[in-house]
Image (spheres, helix red, strand yellow):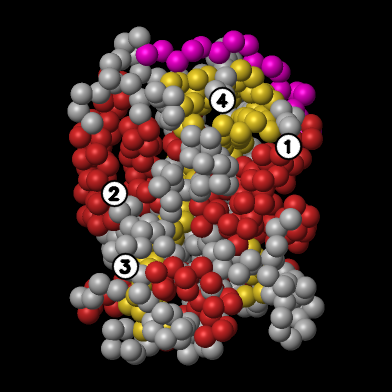
Amino acid sequence: MHPSGHYDVLIIGSGAAGLSLALRLAPQARIALISKAALREGATLYAQGGISVVLDKEDSLQSHVEDTLNAGAGLCDPAVVEYTVKHARRCIQWLIDQGVAFTRADGPDTGADYHLTREGGHSHRRVVHAADATGRAVETTLERRAREHPNITVFEYHLAVDLIREKALDSPRGGRCVGAYLLDLRDDNRVAVVSARCTVLATGGAGKVYLYTTNPDIASGDGIAMAWRAGCRVANMEFIQFHPTCLYHPKAKSFLITEAVRGEGGRLLLPDGSRFMDRFDPRGELAPRDIVARAIDHEMKRLGVECVYLDISHKPADFIRAHFPTIHNRCLELGIDITREPIPVVPAAHYLCGGVMTDLRGRTDIEGLYALGEMTFTGLHGANRMASNSLLECLVFAEAAAEDIAHRLEDFALPGPLPAWDESQVTDSDEEVVVAHNWDELRRFMWDYVGIVRTDKRLQRAMHRTELLKQEIDEYYGNFRVTRDLLELRNLVLIAELIIRSALLRKESRGLHYTLDYPAADLARTPHNTVLTPQHRPGRAQPG
């Protein structure tokens, strides 16, 4: 099926944010739901840990707020944090009503019907989960509901190329967003145009800008890049969360070991079997992720080893199999029995705490354009995301955006005819090796120069290489027909530039941004966000 024509709402992205928004709006609007791969494929599907929510009678909303603010290292917006935490329980109930089967409580009475685990940065057990495959439970349940709804039309294997804005005589930056160009990945790369009263970006993060990442292959920063080209501001792009524990094995591509393993008593060990986290933080293995990731990185470099180890084998085997079935089975496939031996782990790029700036309703700088989920900067995460606040952000802001869009939908006029995609001046590529080479180079220098530990010299080297790559890719884009690899590379090199520019502007170490040139936080200044504003007039940005 081709996504041509007009819809009330165009949603680009089909994770927790996109699916929940579609389901909330479907009773009153015609929805086009766009997925770059299969509908369920995305970061949500692979989320293991769970969703933060206050359910324990010993816990409180204020405690959840304080823990989030502490993890954010002075850059969380307290009003946004309070709003998100306050709406958490209602959104969890909505998921339960949709059919998500969270793990039930089986221990002492806590006042909660569901089992709660504890993760890094949390002072209480407050992570509701479905064993160790929470994202899969959420994604597959919402996917089923979306496919069943008559007002939701699903378009899989379509990659958004760019947003379309109306021309506005009263604004040099252009008018409202009225749709997007979409590349059909299964129909000879045909580009279709779709118009809508309003458009929502929910495309996830950008982990593929790094050589090692827990993210799925589709996480190439498409939504952020499109929004930037269209004229949206971005903020705090320097704050990249590196998950401390990604399985280290040549056959285990991007397999994450959930933080809940440490929450349930998992110990980080050096190759000689000794613990080391207590030397870096009094919270040990339950310190926030940035501290744990830097500690592991430090020990690996100090000892010249390829990995460290995460050991949960001191727990009963039945407990491990019951709480971590996905991890247990995957490790067994690779010859590792986690009930008897430790798991080899390394840090990997995991989560982007910055992104497209939005308000509490998901509105961006552009009229008619909303953004949700990991690709956004809402003020919730600050300089470091606390574990399991990410899916919560998707759900809470999808609810807020749905209410706002439903209220304003009739105010968004029907767009007129939109210009078709013009390929009259381009040809098929004759050197695909250029794309493959640039893709590899980009991800390697981002890992080496813009990783867990940074310096101004490393960042300048990365920026120089980014500028050269960007020129080459722009020339390539302007002369050849678009393909998935080319579009993703075009987006990733822009994401790299935004990350590096933001990192160069921050002359301190804070949260996830650690630089040897400024190893301490700048206490003389009020903590500030790094905001970048496009300096160009947006266009259709198509070749020809």
Tell me the element at label 2. Answer: helix
Say which residue label 3 marks: 249
Say which residue label 4 marks: 1
Of residue 277 and residue 337, the one placed in the foreground of this image is 337
Say which residue label 2 marks: 443
* 405 falls in the magenta region: yes
Magenta extent: 404-423
Give the residue type that dot 3 points to. His
Q: Which mark is residue 164?
A: none
Residue at 53% x, 50% y is 374
Q: Residues within 10 Å of mark 4 (few under 14, many from 20)?
A: few
Main SS category, magenta section: loop
Say which residue label 1 marks: 149
Apparent side of residue 272 relative to residue 42 in the rendered image (left or right): left
Residue at 49% x, 31% y is 158
Give the residue type that dot 2 points to. Arg
Q: Residues within 10 Å of mark 3 (few under 14, many from 20)?
A: some
Tell me the distance, in whole angstroms, between the alpha carbons under discs 1 and 3: 41 Å
Q: Residues within 10 Å of mark 1 (few under 14, many from 20)?
A: some
Place residue 407 in its image quadrant. top right
Residue at 39% x, 59% y is 254
User: Residue 456, can we see it?
Assistant: no
User: Tag 2 or tag 3, which sits nearer the N-term?
Assistant: 3
Give the residue type that dot 4 points to. Met
User: Tag 3 or tag 1, which sits nearer the N-term?
Assistant: 1
User: Tag 4 or tag 2, which sits nearer the N-term?
Assistant: 4
Place residue 409 in its image quadrant. top right
Tell me the distance, in whole angstroms, between the alpha carbons under discs 3 and 2: 20 Å
Give the residue type that dot 1 points to. His
Q: Quadrant of the N terminus?
A: top right
